[in-house]
Every structure is written in structure tokens, then in C-alpha cells.
Amino acid sequence: MPNENNAMIRILIFISALLFFIPFTDAEDIFNGTILFKNNDWHFVRCSITQDDYLIETPPETFTQFKELQQ
């Protein structure tokens, strides 16, 4: 029984710590992206936490949705 209580207390402390630190994170530090036009096709370049760049082909619907969000 004491081992179960210790595990439960550790889980509660872990969840409490997560809830405490989440408001301090900034989404721009985690995800940051730009759109570019290359080789006659639209691509989305995403920079992750490690600052790696990814070249991904995106369908035209993606840009339509971006334009709708801007308005």
C-alpha cells in the first residue's frame, strides 16, 4: 500500500509541475514557420526546436485556409 501512495504522490507532483510551467512557454519558441514558392510549387518550411528545416509540398487548399484565417 505505501508504494501505491508514493507513486500517486509522484504523479500528482509531476502533473502539478507541468500545469505550473505550461503558461511560461511561448508557442513561437516551439513552432515557427514561413511559406515559400520554389520550383513552381508552394512549400511550407517549418523550423522546429532543433532549428531543422523541412521542405514539404502542400496542397492549394492549405493556402486557401491561410487566406481565410487572415480575413
Image (cartoon, rainbow, N blue to C red):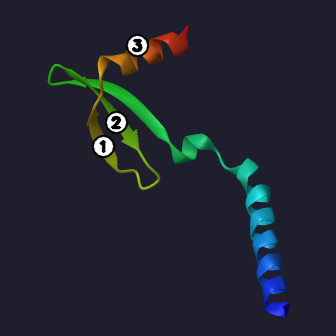
The quadrant where residue 14 appears:
bottom right
**Which residue lies under the disc numbered 1?**
54
Could you tell whether 2 is left or right of 42 in the image?
Answer: right
**Residue 58 vs residue 44, the one in the foreground:** 58
Q: Is residue 61 above or below residue 57?
A: above
In this view, the residue farthest toward the top is: 71
Measuring from the top left, give residue 26's x and y in whole percent: 64, 45
Q: Is residue 13 above or below residue 60?
A: below
Identify the element where label 3 is drawn.
helix
The quadrant where residue 71 appears:
top right
Measuring from the top left, give residue 7's x and y in whole percent: 76, 82
Amino acid type at mark 2: Val
Q: Mark 1 or 3 closer to N-term?
A: 1
Q: Label 3: how many residues lie within 10 Å, few (<14), some (14-19) or many (20+)?
A: few
**Residue 59 vs residue 29, the one in the foreground:** 59
Q: Label 1: how many residues lie within 10 Å, few (<14), some (14-19) or many (20+)?
A: few
Identify the element where label 2 is drawn.
strand
Amino acid type at mark 1: Tyr
Marks 1 and 3 close (CB-CB < 8 Å): no
